[in-house]
Image: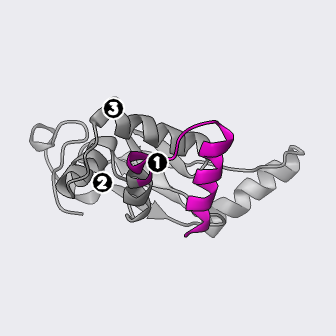
């Protein structure tokens, strides 16, 4: 069993919550992926694997994983949230296309150094950070505005 799963089980038990097959299925689904799925994508994937689960159960259990500190929830556009599992010690930031929804992870030693400098200058001890740059990916930037997809709609393979 993974350290993350042990942490999730301890979190559930400490909070007086039951360890259910549905909770473990949502955990396994999000930790089996590399990427930034939305709740509906996780729900559809579980249904495709014949896991009997409701959409509301997926949403509730994703929020439990966020509360536990194992998953981050990111806003994409105005109406959509993406989820990402967290591995301790792994830090990266995101470029998010506001038209097609493509999410690109990047690591920048320069940004990390600047964050340390800013924190040191202000006597601040950081424990986390989030940086998301929104804009247009190369594909969407090359399209005329009328040909661009609606917010979060898939436009091209990533």
Query: In the picture shown, does residue 133 fall above or below 139?
Result: above
Magenta stretch contains residue 37: no
Residue at 28% from the left image edge and 36% from the top image edge: 55
For the residues marked 2 and 3, what is the alpha-carbon distance in whole angstroms? 25 Å
Decide: marks 2, 3 in contact (CB < 8 A)? no
* Residue tagged 1: 133
Other residues around mark 1 within 10 Å, as few (<14) / some (14–19) / many (≥20): few
The x, y position of residue 146, in whole percent, is 10, 37
The answer to which image quadrant residue 81 occupies is top left
Q: Is residue 37 left or right of residue 74?
A: left
| Type of colouring | one colour
Magenta part of the protein: which range?
1-24
Could you tell me which secondary element the residue under label 1 belongs to? strand
* Residue tagged 3: 56
Q: Is residue 119 visible?
A: yes
Magenta stretch contains residue 7: yes
Q: Quick one: label 1 or label 2, which is nearer the N terminus? A: 2
For the residues marked 1 and 2, what is the alpha-carbon distance in whole angstroms? 12 Å
Q: Which sits in the foreground, 5 or 18?
A: 18
For the residues marked 1 and 3, what is the alpha-carbon distance in whole angstroms? 30 Å
Q: Is residue 122 left or right of residue 132?
A: right
Q: Is residue 94 left or right of residue 40?
A: right
For the residues carrying marks 1 and 2, which lies nearer the camera in this image?
2
The x, y position of residue 142, in whole percent, is 19, 54
Residue at 52% from the left image edge and 50% from the top image edge: 71
* Residue tagged 2: 102
């Amino acid at each position: 069993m993974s350290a993350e799963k042990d942490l999730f089980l301890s979190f559930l038990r400490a909070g007086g919550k039951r360890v259910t097959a549905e909770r473990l299925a949502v955990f396994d689904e999000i930790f089996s992926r590399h990427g930034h799925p939305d709740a509906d994508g996780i729900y559809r994937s579980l249904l495709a694997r014949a896991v009997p689960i409701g959409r509301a159960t997926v949403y509730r259990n994703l929020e439990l994983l966020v509360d536990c500190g194992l998953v981050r929830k990111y806003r994409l556009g105005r109406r959509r949230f993406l989820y990402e599992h967290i591995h301790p010690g792994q830090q990266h930031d995101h470029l998010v296309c506001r038209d097609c929804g493509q999410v690109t992870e990047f690591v920048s030693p320069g940004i990390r150094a600047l964050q340390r400098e800013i924190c040191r200058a202000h006597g601040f001890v950081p424990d986390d950070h989030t940086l998301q740059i929104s804009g247009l990916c190369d594909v969407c930037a090359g399209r005329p505005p009328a040909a661009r997809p609606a917010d979060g709609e898939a436009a091209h393979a990533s």
